[in-house]
Image (cartoon, rainbow, N blue to C red):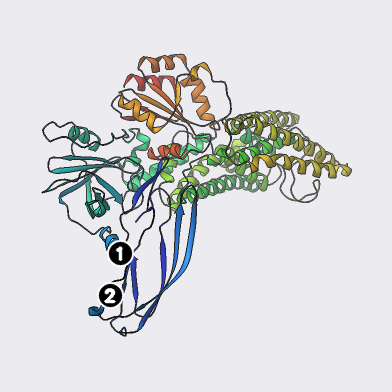
Amino acid sequence: MLPGDAGLATRLRWTLEPGYQAGPIQWPVPQRLRVGDLANYGYEGDVLLPVLVQVPQGARIGGTARFAARADWLVCNDICIPGSADLQLALPVRAPGDVRPSPVAPEFAATLAQVPSPMRLQDAHASIDGSHVLLEFSGPNALPRTLEFFPLEPKRIVASADQIYLPRAKRAYLELAAQTPVEPNFRQLRGVLVADGGPRANGWVAQIDLELSAAPPGGVSRLMPQIASSNDLGKAPDVRAPLPMPAPNAQDAAFARGSVSPALALVGALAGAFVGGLILNLMPCVFPVLSLKLIGLVKHRDESRAALRAHGVAFALGVVLSFLTLAGLLIVLRAAGSQIGWGFQLQSPPFIAVLIVLFFLIGLNLLGAFEFTFGSGLANSRAARSLEGEGPRGSFATGVLVAAVASPCTAPFMGAALGYAVTQSAAVGLAVFALLGLGMATPYLVLTLVPAWLARLPRAGAWMERLRQVMAFPMFLTCVWLFWVLAQQRGADAVAWVLLALVGWGLFAWSAGLVQRGAHRFRYLAVAAALLAGVAMVPLVRSGTSAAEPTLVAAASEEDWTQWSQEGQRAALAQGSPVFIDFTAAWCITCQANKRLVLHDEEVQEAFRQHGVVLMRADWTRRDEAIARELARFARSGVPMYVLYDRKGVAHLLPEILSRKGVLEELAGI
């Protein structure tokens, strides 16, 4: 039995005498346990987990059989605690006619009655339509008043989604929500049906295995309301209304709906990742770091062709390996149950603080306060030089920094590709992320492989030193942006601690520069300043990720926006109102540009009001698993994402980079 959205199944590892064989756990019907927006399958109170043991034919009657097992389990309330125990049991071996029921035999019998066995339902049929699965069957007798489904395979059915049951005359209909993007090998509906609470409540339980077919005419989402509104088939019991969640109709999410072959979907994802990586070079969050490499290109263009190639390859390796590292961490965390997506590292205030310090030090380095060196001896190290520096190691370091800065950005073509990547196998996911990094590194790599193109750049001269100093200010502007992100997450106190740390790092940079120029007596001041700056960062790291909501002054254009929730979305759609949802984050530059240039445009705002659109904002600045799951439902793993639900509840997915004309055209069609 699956644990649901989270959890861990109980496991038994047996040590038996020769000839004895233990079967799998006979899982009784679980309960659906809801925790916020998640749902787990588990048990409350005392539970028996029967295991059938086969006794060898040569077992000696009158002897003793000894059983040993290592049991591992998970118990959860407000917190989850794993437990384990080494268990032993000795039982007498008796003849078949000499069986003596134990005092707990009735409890085992009641539990075994809760264990589902395969059942063939009459005229049963299962169909799928995008994110909707419809199970229907007939009954010669009275249909159950309640019906619940538990999947037996992972990544098939959304555990927390409402299950809509409609009994009509002699036919039962159960609508389930399929996880999106739909797994290509989701061709069978395997699971457990629990009718009227199961045997303990005078109901029944059955295990089913039905082949999935195409949806009936009109689709599942349209068929269910027709069934519910039928006047000649009797009245349905009281059930919850489904949340309209059709699959998005954007072309870049076509493979998420299963409308293209898996091979074509993979090719599309790889191509989208490569093109998205190319476009990332044009995103404002990457400009400051890439400008360093442009200076480096001018500086190194007179070197040998082999040296230029070494710079290009080193930079490309730094980008690609960094993207692969981020992708690997993302895949591992998602496999462990964390609902995170692209740019997840900028949801960590300590990581943002480290980036602020890094860009601040780079700015001071560009102004000439000190030079970057590593290892012992600030002035005499033979390790890597500054980020625009002397060898391929500097180019590799720049590639790493570029990947770190670019990660919160989502360029066109990237969204669907990344959403596809995190739902596939690790090998496919890493391939998509590798193409993303390669696309980003390609322009610089091509320039180093074709030296003739470098000849068009200006010759080196005194202007390069002035340009280097000017480029310090984009670094400081990046610090301002990161400070704003930090304030959104943690408030003014966190900003104050990091500012205090920057004073210490500034003193360190000044002292280190003096040491590098021969004033070695300042080396102790440099070390002390670095230590004090590190201490100033401790409160931010120790306080974790929780913090009071920062007090911000909302702009007038923000007054019409409400915080997104599935309940609010459901209520608005039930009233027939169109809904526009802005999935955003403070650390997403593209999100902020779209907000200021398009969503806050007076003409767009007026169009929203004229069409009666309910405006919702899903802010992912801080980690929110409900938002992460909603992104995954549209085959996305990062922001921005813009969804417009029309009056019929059909979702329209807008591009990552908005235009006023595009939004107005979408609104005109609802």
Amino acid type indicated by mark 2: Arg
SS at mark 2?
loop
Amino acid type indicated by mark 1: Phe
Taking the spot 81% from the left edge, 39% from the top edge, the residue there is 513
In the rendered structure, the answer to whether residue 198 lies left or right of residue 299 reads left
Foreground: 553 or 257? 553
The crowding category of the residue bearing disc 1, from other C-alpha atoms within 10 Å (few below 14, some 14 to 19, many at least 20), is: some
Res 97 label? none
Res 100 label? 2
Foreground: 529 or 4? 4
Q: Position of residue 220 (x, y in %)?
A: 23, 38
In the displayed structure, 558 sits above or below 83; it is: above
Number of dots carrying numbers: 2
Quadrant hosting residue 363:
top right
The mark nearer the N terminus, 2 or 1, is 2
In the displayed structure, 554 sits above or below 68; it is: above
Question: Which residue matches tag 1?
Answer: 108
Q: Position of residue 584 (x, y in %)?
A: 49, 31
* Label 2 vs label 1, nearer the camera: 2
Label 2 vs label 1: CA separation?
A: 14 Å
In the rendered structure, the answer to whether residue 10 lies left or right of residue 317 reads left
**From the image, which quarter does the N terminus lie in?**
bottom left
| Residues under numbered marks 2 and 1 in contact, where contact means CB atoms less than 8 Å apart | no
